[in-house]
Amino acid sequence: YLEFRYCCWFKLAIVLVLSQTWQPCVTRFCIPSSHHIREFHYVNLKMNWTNAQNYCREKYTDLASIESTNHIKRLTTPYLDTEIAWIGLRDDPDAWKSNMGNSINSWRWSVTREPSTTGYQNWVFANPNNLFSAEYCVIMDIAGAWLDTRCGFLKFFVCYNGKKRFLLMNFSLLTYPDNL
C-alpha cells in the first residue's frame, strides 16, 4: 500500500527505497524550493527608479525581476495604466571595469545584484544603448520589452512579492513480504 498526499506547485521527483520489513513507515518532511512564486503588482504612483525600489522593498519584496516569457505574459494582463513602468533591472558600472565599457553582462536585478539566472532578456532593438552615457535603469513597455533610460525620470513601476515556498510532503508506506 502506497499513499502520497502533498500540495505542490512544482514538478518533484521522489525516489523511495522499499525495505523488506513488515512495518508501517509514516514520514513527513519539507523540501525547500529554489523557485520563487512571484506576485506582480503595478503601482500607479510616479517615482524615480531609486524611490520606486525603496517603495517596493517597503511594501512588497522589490522591483519586478523578469526571468521568463511566462512572467511577461502575467505582467501584460491586466494592462498598465501607462505604456511604460520601471522594473528591477539596473546597469552596474563597476562590472564594466573588465569589459572596456558598457557590457550586456553588467545589468543586474536589484533583488539579487546579479545578472539573470535564466539568461532571459527582452531588450527593444538597439538597447541597451546607454544614450549620452546616462541610462542605467530599465523601463518595460506594454508588450514587455525593455529599454534603458535615465534613473531620475518619474515613472510608474512594477513590484513583486517573491516568497520561497516549502513543499510539505506526507506519505505512508507499508511493505509486505514477497510470499503474500
Image (cartoon, helix red, strand yellow):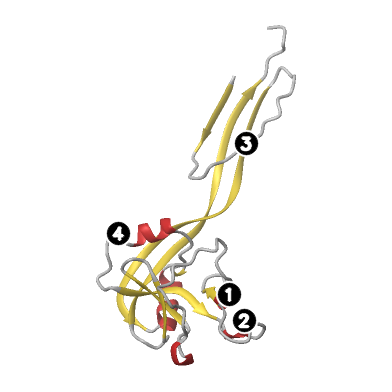
Write down the quadrant of residue 138 in the picture.
bottom left
Front disc: 1 or 4: 1
Q: Residues within 10 Å of mark 3 (few under 14, many from 20)?
A: few
Disc 1 residue type? Asn
Mark 2 sits on what residue? 95
Distance between mark 3 and mark 4 Cα atoms: 35 Å
Write down the quadrant of residue 81 in the picture.
bottom left
Do the CB atoms of the residues marked 2 and 1 lie less than 8 Å apart? yes
Do the CB atoms of the residues marked 3 and 4 lie less than 8 Å apart? no
Which of the labelled discs sits on residue 105, or is there none? Answer: 1
Which of the labelled discs sits on residue 14, or is there none? Answer: 3
Q: Give x and y (percent) for residue 71.
A: 41, 59
Front disc: 3 or 4: 4
Distance between mark 2 and mark 1 Cα atoms: 8 Å
Q: Residues within 10 Å of mark 2 (few under 14, many from 20)?
A: some
Which of the labelled discs sits on residue 34, or is there none? Answer: none
Residue in view at x 40 percent, y 78 percent: 52
Disc 3, SS = loop
Label 3 or label 1, whichever comes before in sequence order? 3
Disc 3 residue type? Ile
Residue at the far right in the pictured view: 20
Disc 4, SS = loop
Distance between mark 2 and mark 3 Cα atoms: 41 Å
Decide: is 59 above or below 77: below
Distance between mark 4 and mark 2 Cα atoms: 34 Å
